[in-house]
Each structure stands twice: as structure tokens, then as C-alpha cells.
Image (cartoon, grey):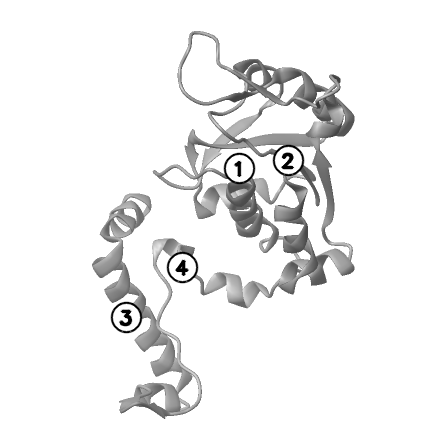
Amino acid sequence: MKITILTLFPDIVESFFRNSIMEKAVNKNIIEYNIVNFRDFAFDRHKTCDDAPYGGGAGMVLKAEPLALALDTVVSSQSKVILPTPSGIPLTQSLAYELAEHEELVFICGRYEGIDQRIIDTYVDQEITIGDYVISSGEIASLVIIDSVYRLIDGVISKESLAEESFSDNLLEYPQYTRPEEFRGLKVPPILLSGNHAEIDKWRKEKRIEKTIKNRPELLAEKRKTV
């Protein structure tokens, strides 16, 4: 998969691709990335990328011209262009799986009051929100989406790990424990030390259901609809 990020702050996103699992995916040529500073496409001497909104109001809006010129250099027939925005559709695990099927993803990192609507109308394929709140950085929102997607691509992490994660089968993940067996008076549940894998699987499923009922009961309601 090729991932392109259009941003005014490339340093924010660069380190993401050079660490941890993502770095390994890049080194194995599973992921290719391109970071584009669209300020380089501003054509006035001050490299202006924002201006006051028509109709008045607080804040500034990212201009159409530099974004369009930058997009013209990176968008291909294979690209899916994504704008992270509070006005978008919610990011879910199922949406992450859909995005993981694409060969190229292009992210536009908004700032300030947003971007000129004409860019959205002309270039953007999907607007996505990472939650019902507002943050100042389109870079962070883009990285959240990217992190949810790239790990689903074959060869990045094991399929076994994906199968047991939260939201698989509309259930949250079961509790995890590691050494030592006792920590500050709290002991690892004996079933996990038993070696009885059938009983361990049963315990884990029960804990997944318990946690889902406690934290996200609406997921169980969705699960019942699909059964």
C-alpha cells in the first residue's frame, strides 16, 4: 500500500513511519509512504496557504490553490483521497478493513477552520471522523486512521492477533496478563496457568462478553442484529 500525506507540518508525521511496527512494514516494502508539504505549492512570495473565510467568522481557511496543485501531483486512478474531519463518517473497524483493500490512500491534513469546500467537492472521496470531538491537528487524525488501517494489511502483524482484538465479532478484547504471577497482591487468574486451552478459550470469551456489556453494550445489540 502507498500512503501519501499532504500537510503543512511534515515533522509531525515523519517519525510515525520510522518507528515500531510501521518501520518494519516500510522496510519489508509492505508500506510505501510519501509526505508532501503543500506550502511548497503556494505561488505567492510569502507561501500563503490560508486566508479569511468568505462571509466572515473566526479563524482561517486553507486555500484551494496550493492544495489542488499538490493533489494534482500525487493523485492517480488508484488513489482514494481522505479528509479527516469532525464532519465525516465515524472511523470503525469495518471501515478500516475497507480502506485496507485500497492500493493508495491520500490524506489531506486540515488545520484552522478547515479547507476550502471546493477541494472537498473536487478531490475528496471520503470524509472520516475519529470521534465526536474537535482537535487542532489533521496530522494526528490522519495518523489514527493510518494506524488502524496498515496493521490489517497482510504481512504486517499475525492474523491470529487480529482475530482476538477488540471489535472482532463485535466484542471487546479479554484481559491480558504476563509475568510476574503476583503483582502487589493481585494474582493472575488460575485458569490462565492451567494449560487447559479449551477452558482458557471459554474464560476469554466470557470475559469479552462481560467487558462489552460493561463498556460498550451497543456492540452486543449490533451483534444480535447480524445473527
- Residue 17: image x %, image y %? 68, 54
Number of residues whose C-alpha sits closer than 10 Å to that of mark 3, classed few (under 14), some (14–19) or many (20 or more): few
Q: Mark 2 or mark 4, which has the lower sequence index?
A: 2
Foreground residue among 205 and 70: 70
Q: Contact (CB < 8 A) between labels 1 and 4? A: no
Earlier in the chain: of badge 1 and badge 2, it is 2
Residue matched to label 4 = 166
Question: In this image, 203 relative to 48: left or right?
Answer: left
Per the model, the C-alpha gap separating discs 1 and 3 is 38 Å
What residue is shown with label 1?
Answer: 138
Query: Marks 3/4: CA distance?
Result: 14 Å
Q: Are marks 1 and 2 in contact (CB under 8 Å)?
A: yes
Q: Residue at x 57, y 63 (%)?
A: 159
Q: CA distance from mark 1 to mark 4?
A: 25 Å
| 72 relative to 115 in the view: left or right | right
Q: CA distance from mark 2 to mark 3?
A: 44 Å
Looking at the image, tell me whether mark 2 or mark 3 is earlier in sequence order: 2
Residue 118 coordinates in the image, percent (x, y)? 57, 13
Viewport quadrant of the N terminus: top right
Q: Residue furthest front?
A: 46
Tell which circle, 1 or 4, labels the residue nearer the N-terminal end: 1
Question: Which numbered disc flags the more N-terminal residue, 3 or 4?
Answer: 4
Q: Residue at x 70, y 22 (%)?
A: 46
Residue type beneath disc 1: Gly
- Secondary structure state at the residue bearing disc 3: helix
**In the structure shown, which secondary structural element does the residue marked by tag 4 occupy?**
loop
Give the labeled residue for mark 3. 206
Q: Nearer the viewer, mark 2 or mark 3?
A: 2
Mark 1 nearby-residue class (10 Å; few <14, some 14–19, many ≥20):
many
Circle 1/circle 3 CB separation < 8 Å: no
